[in-house]
Structures are given as C-alpha cells and as structure tokens.
C-alpha cells in the first residue's frame, strides 16, 4: 500500500496562497511612454495577439501543479510491500557426530529392530534438527579427522539430509574428539557470543587427531562455546562366542570422564545414552536447556517513490520558465 513518511508536510500546500494574501503587493512602475498613431496598424500585422488573462491562467495552473508535486515529493511517498517473515535470530548450533568404526555396533533398538549406534543417532538427531526452527545449524563429522559436512545454515532440511547420508568410516575408523571441538571453535568464533553451542556425540575415547580434547575444551571456553557431550552405547549386550552367549559391556572404550570434563569446563552437561529412548530424552532436555526463539519477526519491504512527483515538479517548473520566456519574447516583439 501507499504511505507517506512525512504526511505533516501537506500543511505546506496553502503556503503560496498565504504569502500572496498577506505580503504587500509590489508597486508597478510605469516609465515614460511614447504614443504613436501607428501602433494600431502594427498590431494588425501580428497574427496572434497575446491574451493576458489566458496567460495568467496558464501560469497559475502550471505553478500550482508544480508546487503540489513538490510538496508531494517532500512528504516522501513510499510503497509498503507485503509482510515477509524473517529468519529468527536464534542459536548457532553445531552438531559433531562420531563416524568411527565402533559406531557400527548394533546395541540399540529402533522401532522394534536392532540397529547400530549411528542409525539411532541419525533417527533421533534428525528429529531434533527439524525442531530447531530459528537456529543456525551446522554439521561436523569426525573419525580419524574432522570435517564440516554443512556450515551454519537455517536450512534444516539440508543439514538433516547430509546427516542421514553420513556413513561409518567416512572420516576414518579412529576418533579425533579434540579436532572436532577445535573445528567447531573455528567455525563459531565469528558468531555472536552467548549463542554458540556444540553438541558432540561419540561412543569412544580420543584415539587420533592433533589436539587433545581437554586442550580443545579450554579453547572452546575462551571462545564462549558451550559443549554438550553425549556418550552413546549400551552397557550390556549379549554376544555369541565359542563358549555360548555371553553378556559384555560394549561401551568399555567410552571415556566418560573426559567427556564430563569437556562439558563442565565449557558450561555444558554430559549425557549418557544407553538406548534409543534415553537418547530421545537427552534431546528433549537439550531443547529445554537451549530453547528455540519463539518471537516471530516480520519485515515489510519499502520502495521510495518520491522521485516521480519530484521529476514531475521539476518538469512543470521548466515548462513554466519556457512559457514565461516565450510570453516575454512575444510581448517585446509586439511592442
């Protein structure tokens, strides 16, 4: 719709009439004139006589229109577009997912079927990502090395797709927890402080990489990055051996002590996910600890239109000036 940024300027419309009415008239001076009997004969030779009444009417119309358009431009007309919802300014959240070889152990149940750890992480993590509307979400995958699968983005669908396409061993068979944290610090260092969050999911201990996990956690603390660590893996699992079925602890390699220190030193929390239900509850707790922004922000595009009436006003003033010069020329020619 059409709006005026400064509508109070329309009060200036009657200003020329007020000036004309209240200011004193300029005194006309008539100099000496030479009367000649040949004047009537000269005027008969001019095919078009100047009609002073019509001339005044035209000047009045042109000047009035020029003034109206000038005031219209000064009021700053603008076209207000339809409201557009802006992306919410929530948190900058990175997910770091372990793709090491141990993540293929089938000690989780999903929809009544036994699945490996990574499949469970994909399923529950994907639901978590879809619910984080308003957050910038990025994905880091790590094994022997750490890689950025997706940078921070509002496109939750793409982040989820790349999470589902992640495969065990894609980044190597070992576990570089420290490198994953260091990469997250690098990617989040330019984001506003107070909104930087890393969710690190692993089932083992740091066995590779160039930086120690606790040293990386110290760097994360200095950068204002909160880290929530999640240790995945059941604590009991039956396996078939030469001596029959035995119960073992498949998560014996999980370094819970280091993961706890990482989380506490950065202001986060360490969680233990022994099954799918437990992993789902952890994500629900994370939604409460790091709630999504609920305010909706709208934006209406504004397009300025002042140059149209301004151009019309300048054109009318130019036309008036040409008309006055032409009238003056004709009068001089006649006289």
Image (tube, rainbow, N blue to C red):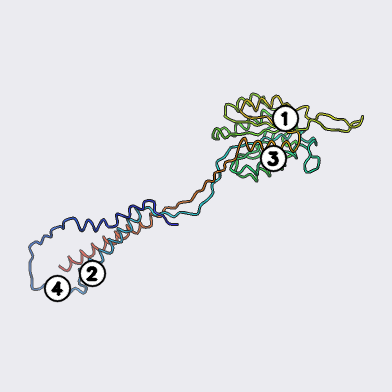
How much space separates mark 4 and mark 2, taking CA atoms?
Answer: 22 Å
Q: Which of the two marks, 1 or 3, is nearer to us in this view?
A: 3
Residue 304 x/y as whole percent: 42, 53
Q: Which of the two marks, 4 or 1, is nearer to us in this view?
A: 1
Residue contact between numbered discs 3 and 2, judged by CB atoms under 8 Å: no
In the rendered image, the quadrant that contains the C terminus is bottom left
How much space separates mark 4 and mark 3, taking CA atoms?
Answer: 100 Å
What residue did someone put label 3 on? Answer: 125
Residue contact between numbered discs 2 and 1, judged by CB atoms under 8 Å: no
What residue did someone put label 4 on? Answer: 42
What residue did someone put label 1 on? Answer: 175
Which is more N-terminal, label 3 or label 4? Answer: 4
The image quadrant that residue 116 belongs to is top right
Q: Indicate which disc residue 54 carries.
A: 2
How much space separates mark 2 and mark 1, taking CA atoms?
Answer: 94 Å
The residue located at (22%, 73%) in the rendering is 48
| In-image side of 65 versus 116 (left or right) | left
Residue 169 x/y as whole percent: 75, 35
Which is more N-terminal, label 3 or label 1? Answer: 3
Total numbered circles: 4
How much space separates mark 4 and mark 1, taking CA atoms?
Answer: 109 Å
């Amino acid at each position: 719709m059409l709006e005026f940024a400064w509508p109070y300027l329309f009060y200036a419309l009657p200003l020329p009439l007020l000036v004309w009415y209240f200011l004193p008239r300029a005194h006309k001076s008539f100099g000496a004139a030479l009367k000649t009997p040949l004047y009537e004969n000269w005027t008969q030779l001019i095919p078009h006589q100047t009609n002073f009444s019509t001339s005044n009417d035209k000047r009045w119309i042109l000047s009035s229109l020029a003034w109206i358009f000038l005031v219209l431009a000064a009021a700053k007309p603008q076209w207000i577009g339809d409201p557009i919802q802006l992306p919410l300014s929530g948190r900058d959240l990175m997910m770091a997912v372990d793709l090491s070889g141990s993540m293929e152990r089938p000690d989780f149940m999903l929809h009544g079927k036994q699945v490996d750890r990574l499949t469970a992480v994909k399923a529950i993590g994907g639901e978590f990502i879809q619910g984080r509307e308003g957050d910038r979400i990025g994905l880091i995958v790590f094994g022997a090395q750490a890689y950025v699968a997706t940078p921070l983005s509002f496109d939750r669908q793409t982040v989820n797709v790349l999470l589902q396409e992640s495969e065990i061993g894609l980044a190597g068979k070992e576990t570089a927890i420290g490198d994953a944290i260091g990469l997250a610090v690098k990617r989040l260092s330019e984001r506003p402080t107070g909104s930087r969050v890393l969710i690190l999911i692993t089932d083992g201990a740091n066995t590779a990489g160039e930086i120690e996990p606790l040293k990386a956690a110290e760097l994360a603390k200095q950068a204002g990055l909160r880290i929530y660590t999640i240790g995945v893996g059941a604590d009991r699992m039956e396996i078939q051996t030469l001596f029959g079925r035995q119960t073992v602890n498949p998560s014996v390699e999980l370094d819970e002590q280091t993961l706890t220190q990482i989380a506490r030193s950065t202001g986060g929390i360490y969680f233990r996910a022994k099954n799918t239900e437990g992993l789902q509850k952890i994500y629900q707790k994370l939604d409460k600890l790091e709630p999504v922004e609920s305010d909706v922000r709208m934006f209406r595009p504004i397009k300025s239109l002042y140059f149209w009436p301004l151009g019309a006003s300048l054109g009318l003033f130019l036309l008036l000036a040409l008309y006055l010069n032409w009238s003056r020329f004709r009068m001089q020619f006649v006289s």
